[in-house]
Image (cartoon, rainbow, N blue to C red):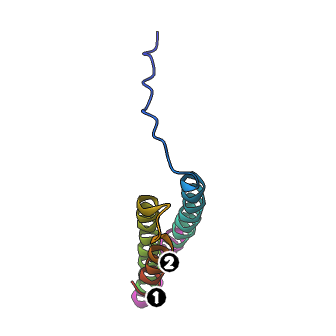
Amino acid sequence: MSAPKKSSPKTVEPQGVSSYRSEHQRDIVNRLRRIEGQVRALVDMVEGGRPCEDVAQQMSAARKAMDKAFYRMMACTVMEAVSGTEIEAEVERSTRILEKYA
């Protein structure tokens, strides 16, 4: 006999938040899949004996991509917090700048 499943508490979200979240989830998943490919390529480079400088350059690119995915995820968190307020557009603009230059 299996234990009964616990139901998670349901939260009421402002309209549009769930569509905003699903859009960002798709974006983050796509970014992570690209990063996964970069990391696989790094393993191949190391196993293939590529020069350390080449590997380091690709590691740097993968790390930067991971940082951007992280900032995008955090932007979603912030946008959910301000959803439906006047400052939503300004927060979105600010998070885009952070992603671009961080």
Q: CA distance from mark 1 to mark 2?
A: 8 Å
Res 46 visible: no
- Which residue is rendered at x = 52% and y = 51% of the image? 14
- Give the percent coordinates (x, y) of residue 102: 39, 83
- Residue situated in front as seen by the camera: 36 or 4: 4
Residue 54: which numbered mark, if any?
A: 1
- Which residue is rendered at x = 42% and y = 71% of the image? 71
Q: Which residues lie in the magenta part?
A: 39-53
Residue 101: which numbered mark, if any?
A: none
Amino acid at the residue labelled 2: Met
The image quarter containing residue 51 is bottom left
Badge 2: how crowded within 10 Å, few (<14), some, or many (20+)?
some
Give the structural element (helix, strand or loop) at label 1: helix
Res 97 visible: yes
Amino acid at the residue labelled 1: Asp
Are dots 1 and 2 in contact, CB under 8 Å?
yes
- Residue situated in front as seen by the camera: 35 or 3: 3
- Give the percent coordinates (x, y) of residue 8: 43, 32
- Which residue is rendered at x = 52% and y = 64% of the image? 32
In primary-sequence order, the first of circles 1 and 2 is 2
| 78 part of magenta stretch | no
Asked whether, in this view, residue 87 is left or right of residue 19, the answer is left
Badge 1: how crowded within 10 Å, few (<14), some, or many (20+)?
few
Q: Magenta stretch: dominant SS?
A: helix
Residue 45: which numbered mark, if any?
A: 2
